[in-house]
Amino acid sequence: MEFCKTLAVTLKRVDYSNTSQIATFYTLNYGKLQALARGSKRMGKKAPGSIDLFSYNEIIFLKKEPGSLHLLTEWELLEDFPAFRKEIERFYSACYAVDLLNKLIDEGETDKPLFHLLLDTLHSLSRDNNKDLSLLAFELQLLKHLGYLPGLGECTQCGKKFPRNSGAVLSPFQRGLVCKTCSGHSEVGARHAVPLQLSPSALSTANFLAGCKLSALNRLHVPQKVREELKRLSTEYLSQIWGRPVGAWR
């Protein structure tokens, strides 16, 4: 066993006893981990303080054997995102972001770029007006980073780049996007469980969101029709990962 110090975002917390909780963190140096926080529910001057959902902390924990519950010994709050407690829409958006990451990530896999993506997303959701674009960018960048999002620039059937102003079609069977020509072939078109036409604007916006900095989204104007196309695109990819619809959850 060893003491470890790292930056962490709180993904989840559940009660363990009258005074303690089990917190799930996504950390900079150790990936996702669960730790027992003794006294986190205790009140009083000598209490270490509660661990808030979404909070950005510096934590020290006693690292146990793989598969065991770590022991949280110290935690210092660095940022608590008060906007999430003031606006219900921002709160639910943050809930969705941390829950999505928690569902897609296994414990113990260190990924520093992913940690910074989560932190940037929480900052964006707490201060910007384009909350739905922030979530779409987070979804697409998360799926791309984990290898679940196929290329958005070429047809998964013929391998050719999509012609300018032609758009694309989502092919669940091919697990990606196909061009208009390939989507008309019987062997491909017959297997379209969910035919989704992506307009040229939606395709170019998806490419931008999958690689942009979230700080740029507040200046971006995207028509509602394009936003709906992109929501369906990300929802279908997430449904493919779990093998079940996630529309209601989204």
Image (tube, grey):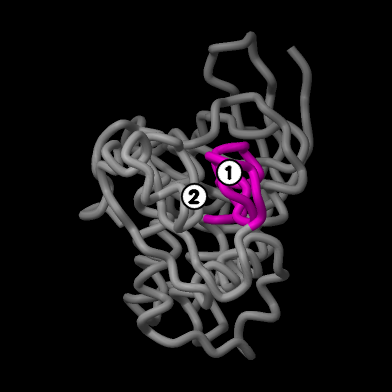
Q: What amino acid does circle 1 point to?
A: Pro
Residue placed under numbered mark 1 in the picture: 150
Query: Any magenta on residue 174?
Result: no
Which residue is drawn at the image coordinates 61% and 60% (left, top)?
162
Rendered view: 171 above or below 219: above
Which residue is drawn at the image coordinates 61% and 32% (left, top)?
72
Query: Any magenta on residue 159?
Result: yes
Q: CA distance from mark 2 to mark 1?
A: 8 Å
Question: Is residue 82 shown left or right of residue 72?
Answer: left
Which residue is drawn at the image coordinates 51% and 51% (left, top)?
51
In depth, the one of 21 and 93 nearer the eye is 93
Rendered view: 174 above or below 212: above
Asked where in the image residue 169 lies, by quadrant, the reply is bottom left
Magenta-colored span: 140-161
Question: Is residue 158 shown left or right of residue 178?
Answer: right
Asked where in the image residue 145 lies, by quadrant, the reply is top right
Which residue is drawn at the image coordinates 34% and 37% (left, top)?
15
Q: Main secondary structure of the magenta part?
A: loop
Q: Quadrant of the C terminus?
A: bottom left
Give the percent coordinates (x, y) of residue 109: 67, 27
Give the percent coordinates (x, y) of residue 171: 39, 45
Assess whether mark 1 and mark 2 are in contact (beta carbons under 8 angstroms). Answer: yes
Graded by Cα atoms within 10 Å as few (under 14), some (14 to 19) or many (20 or more), the crowding at tag 1 reads some
Give the percent coordinates (x, y) of residue 112: 77, 43
Asked where in the image residue 226 lies, by quadrant, the reply is bottom left
Residue placed under numbered mark 2 in the picture: 177
Q: Earlier in the sequence, mark 2 or mark 1?
A: 1
